Image (spheres, helix red, strand yellow):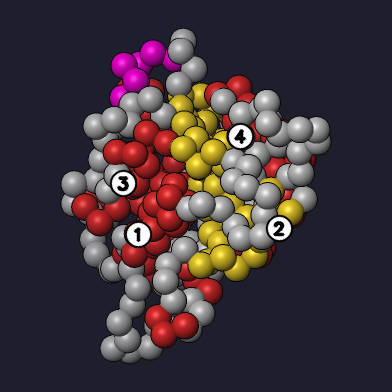
Amino acid sequence: MDQFLDLPYVTPVEDERDRFREFDLYIPRRSGSPDNRPAPPVICFIHGGAWRSEDKADHSNLAQSLATYTGCPVAVPNYRLTPRSPASGEEVLRHPAHAEDVLRFLAFLLAWPGPTNHNGLQFDPSRLFLVGHSCSAHMLAAILLDTPDTPSVTPTPELLQAVKGAIFSEGIYDIDLLLKSFPDYRDWFIANAFGDRPSYADVSVATLPHREGGAHIRYLIIHSKGDTLVDQPQSEAMYGHLVHLDGADTTQGRVVKNWGELEEDHNDILRGKEYVRIVGDFVLAVD
């Protein structure tokens, strides 16, 4: 496994490191001659953490497991976070800034020639599989679906076409629905990440239409029976919406769900072999 850590996806200002806009890349070593085999797609895992916590390094083991299982390189970016306890009068980083960073990372990856001191570009960035967990499922959905109120997260047609599949696990999609189940989340992280307001209907991603050129993307919605932090109605809302966008046709396999196999809690699923298998099998089947 070749590892390339702390790669910047934005140009540092005055050579100062911006650790929130870096990514790690894990490339499995391929046996035999690579000349007669197509380069594999890239899996991008975007971490969760309630828009305010976690780091790409927390998911190194998962990334390596996914790379080993699929034979695909796995990239894990950081993005800027909302402060946990902003000071009075402090300018707070809020949505859609997190998703803007993720979009910048994806745009960078699409045009990137690959890491230096490596034997050529041994992956195909024009074939991307995006994995969003918890809050990052919301970020990716805001990028992939049509969000006219936030044009800053609009991908280029080339990037949208490059995305072949999206996997959302334990995702947050409808914040008003989430607050009905977990009202304490407003003060815990929602108000800081989105602003304190009566309704968050305008930032629900479970109502958005396809972007032009985005209807080809295949989706897998994962939810664990043991998740105590995000309840299944979130995944039900998103799955139902995506199926509706697909003309209520579940026979083509463009939108699939897995709500029965995982039993661990919210982040514990990321440490198990079953999550790797479920995500990996989806990638291999679509690719």
- The answer to whether the residues at label 4 and label 1 have Cβ atoms under 8 Å apart is no
- Which residue is tagged 1? 100
The amino acid sitting under disc 2 is: Gln
- Among numbered discs 3 and 1, the one appearing first in the sequence: 1
Near-viewer residue (13 or 263)? 13
Of the residues under marks 4 and 2, which one precedes in the sequence?
A: 2
Q: Which residue is mark 3?
A: 155
Which span of residues is magenta-colored? 245-250
Residue at 66% in and 27% down = 37
Q: Which mark is residue 39?
A: 4
Q: Amino acid at mark 3?
A: Pro
**Which image quadrant for residue 163?**
top left
Point out the tag, 4 or 3, that comes first from the N-terminus. Answer: 4
Mark before the other along the chain sequence, 2 or 3: 2
Query: Does residue 205 appear in this view?
Result: no
> Taking 112 as reference, is 287 left or right?
right
Q: How far separated are the C-alphas under marks 2 and 1?
A: 25 Å
Q: Nearer the viewer, mark 3 or mark 1?
A: 3
Where does residue 136 sit, x and y in percent of width and height? Answer: 47, 52
Q: How many numbered circles does the render carry? A: 4
Mark 2 vs mark 3, CA separation in Å: 28 Å
Please report contact status of discs 2 and 3: CB closer than 8 Å, yes or no: no
Q: Of the numbered discs in the image, which one, if any, rests on residue 3?
A: 2
Residue, far bottom: 88
Q: Is residue 24 above or below residue 40?
A: below
Q: Nearer the viewer, mark 4 or mark 3?
A: 4
Q: Looking at the figure, which quarter contains the C terminus?
A: top right
